[in-house]
Amino acid sequence: MIRSVRQRAGALLGALALAFFGLPAHALDAAAVGRLAFGDGDERIEAIGALVAAGEPRVRELLQALADGELQTAGERVLIVRGEAGFDAVSGERIAPLPAERDEVVANNRLRSAVGAALASLKLLAPERATRLEAARALSGAVDAATAPLLRRALEREADAEIRSLLAMTVASLDLASSDRATRLAAIRALGDSSSASVKPLLAAAAKDPDPEIGSAAKLSLVAVEGRLKWGEIGGLLFTGVSLGSILLLAALGLAITYGLMGVINMAHGELIMIGAYTAYVVQNAFRQLGLFEWYLLAAVPAAFAVAALVGMLLERAVIRWLYGRPLETLLATWGISLVLIQGVRTLFGAQNVLVENPAWMSGGIAALSNLVLPWNRIAIIVFAALVLAAIGLLLARTRLGLYVRGVTQNREMASCVGVPTARVDTLAFGLGAGIAGLAGCALSQLGNVGPDLGQGYIVDSFMVVVFGGVGQLAGTVYAALVLGFGNKFLEASSGAVIAKIVVLVFIIVFIQHRPQGLFALKGRAA
């Protein structure tokens, strides 16, 4: 009885030891493990395929040890060494003490690539859908013949339609190298249903096959794949055009009020955008210290509007108020103010760019097609621009301030005669335009680094949008921003960014020569 109790206790301790060290008692193929450690390049690759095909649970641990530099040899024995603990790579038994003389199993780039593909393929058998989907996507770009048996087994047991589609494309890529003609034709037809750019080189190579039937089938499949990819490219151009148009709209909306409605040529408008971006940076740092980083935009948006609006009203009260009706002096004065603001920011924050990070909910994007990803930060900016535009439209059409601004814009003397405080309206309208510029800066901070020269890249584009749309017309500003956004992106796709800028500028010059009032001209007494 005592002996029985001791045997049970020993078995229990052995099980606990195995559980503690995470080493199951399943033995691996000793010959394959030996080839993996001592063989040449091809033998080691074949050994990985054999181990993966066997499907033993401990294969992942062995390959991970090789990838992490924990696989060693002692004589003819292969060991997994973690710190001071050593385990037999074949049986999983713990080895104590470790042999004094050991050599590390070195993995070259080819072997590391094969190990990475094998580890990814092993994830295809995981119970979690997200893990299997991630593995299928990782394998779709880099396939290895050694992983073919496991891929086929995973395809047979997979029930999810999206993962099955990815695995089918991967298996077809492998079958394309088969020596069987029927298998190759089936693989070519299967790849023709793909919408991934990674299959194009495979089909292009197959199209040069001396077999006329294989070459013809590959050409047809290649045409079908390129047709689907073309839709993704067009969708990408449309999305980037809307994205650029929304950015130009945000940058130009404030100028449409200060220049379009008030007639003030404000060369410091770009620096008001820059102030909004730096306000977002300051709010981000404050919320990071409070542990509320994910919510900083909720405070950064109103803060950027308020700070830029206060700076704009201060400029109007101190400088611009005395220069109404004198466009050249206003231009020179606001240009000087822009230099002062740039230098002030350099003094406070330094000349180097600062980083404004996206919250987690604005990271990543939507994979609309295989070659089209819509980033969340640009989607958020498009929605934000639409909301700002709607708010400005309601403010100008439905509020007393909007009524006053429209009245002063159309006939300042008559508005003053009926009791409109024109001086106060000028200050508030200029502050509104400056605040919208601050909102543009807050939005732009989500697309890249923020620096003292941030606004300089948008001042010319903002003036082009306002002039092209029609001075004093907010609707024209919207259409002009979208037209210029689409024009820039479609020209960039065919001729490059520099040529696109030149063509757009020449177009604006020619357009203004023939239609100086812009797309939408003022009508009636307002003209």
Image (spheres, rainbow, N blue to C red):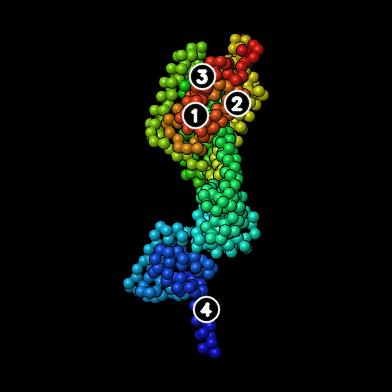
Total label count? Answer: 4
Among the 4 quarters of the image, the one containing residue 233:
top right
Q: Is residue 508 above or below residue 250?
A: above
Q: SS of the residue at dot 1?
A: helix
**Could you give the CA–CA distance between mark 4 and mark 1, rounded to whole angstroms?**
75 Å
Give the number of the mark in front: 4 or 1.
1
Residue 375, given in percent of the width and then of the height, sits at 55, 42
Q: CA distance from mark 1 to mark 3?
A: 14 Å
Q: Give the number of the mark in front: 2 or 3.
A: 3
Residue at coordinates 62% horizontally, 16% vertically from top-left? 522
Can residue 276 be spotted in the picture? no
Residue 270 coordinates in the image, percent (x, y): 48, 26
Looking at the image, is mark 2 or mark 3 earlier in the sequence?
2
Residue 447 versus residue 509 in the image, above or below: below
Q: CA distance from mark 4 to mark 2?
A: 77 Å
Nearer-N-terminus badge (1/3): 1
Numbered disc 3: secondary structure: helix
Q: CA distance from mark 2 to mark 3?
A: 17 Å
Q: Quadrant of the N terminus?
A: bottom right
Q: Earlier in the sequence, mark 2 or mark 1?
A: 2
